[in-house]
Amino acid sequence: MKVLLAEDDPEIRGTLVALLQDNGFIVDACADGQDALNHGLENDYAVVLLDFGLPVFSGEQIMTRWKRAGRRFPVLAVTGTRTLREEVRELIQLGIDQYVQKPVLDYSILIDWVKARANSSASGGHGSLIRRGELELDTENLITRFKGKRIELSPSQFQVLRVLALNEGPPLSCRTISSRCFDETDGSREMQVRMHIARIREKFGFNIIVNVAAAQGYRIEL
């Protein structure tokens, strides 16, 4: 199972990566909030370990943007500053499942929590839904709904729409969409992306994906 570890302290990060890997987890590790935000928007994780004092984007900003994009993971907040009762309540309202105060005195308890939450997630304890306005993507079952109505998409069309639904930045080029969907960026794949976008528009019955000519990219517009 896959875990996201966002921690800017290299010593803590190295220790946790080693422990998680020893327990059979695949670990994506990052040291700043921008990287953590992007990983969570582009990947599904059984568990996220999130330092709330990251540079670039704080844990609060990351959680808010994930929530806005419909991204849901079991999140363990690791914090050395937010320890008062009201501050902990704020963390819970953001959607965290648990928090650990720095300095971490017993890593084994933290790893046990990760294992328990990962097993719960694997057995259906957490779904994986992406929501963008009235658009809903079920990434586990590859089901697309718009205004409550199911839209039948091929797996490749679903992946293209998923990448665009998760994007909160500038419009995405065909090359970028191709690399995120197919792990390839050759010309034929980029042409396929254009074809998938055309078919998605047909199935929705309107121009859900807009081509921003000046930026030479695509974005969802609802």
Image (cartoon, rainbow, N blue to C red):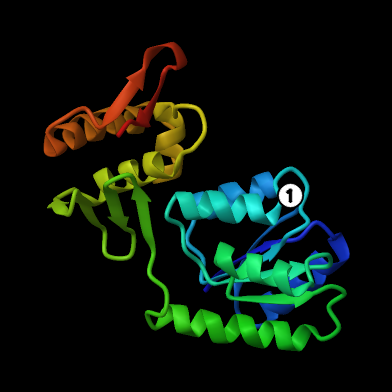
**Mark 1 nearby-residue class (10 Å; few <14, some 14–19, many ≥20):** many
Q: In this view, does 68 lie to the left or right of 136?
A: right
Residue at 25% x, 43% y is 157
Whether residue 182 is visible to the viewer of this picture, yes or no, is no
168 with respect to 5 (left or right) = left
Amino acid type at image mark 1: Asp
Residue behind mark 1: 32
The answer to whether 168 is drawn above or below residue 5 in the figure is: above
Task: Please state if 86 lies on the left or on the right of 133 as rendered.
Answer: right
Res. 178 image quadrant: top left
Give the answer, above or below, for where 37 lies relative to 25. Answer: above
Q: Which of 124 and 195 is in front in this view?
A: 124
* Residue 92 visible in the displayed image: yes
Q: Residue 140: which quarter of the image?
A: bottom left
Location of residue 187 in the rendering, given as x and y in whole percent from the top left corner = 37, 26
**Residue 51 percent coordinates (x, y):** 73, 62
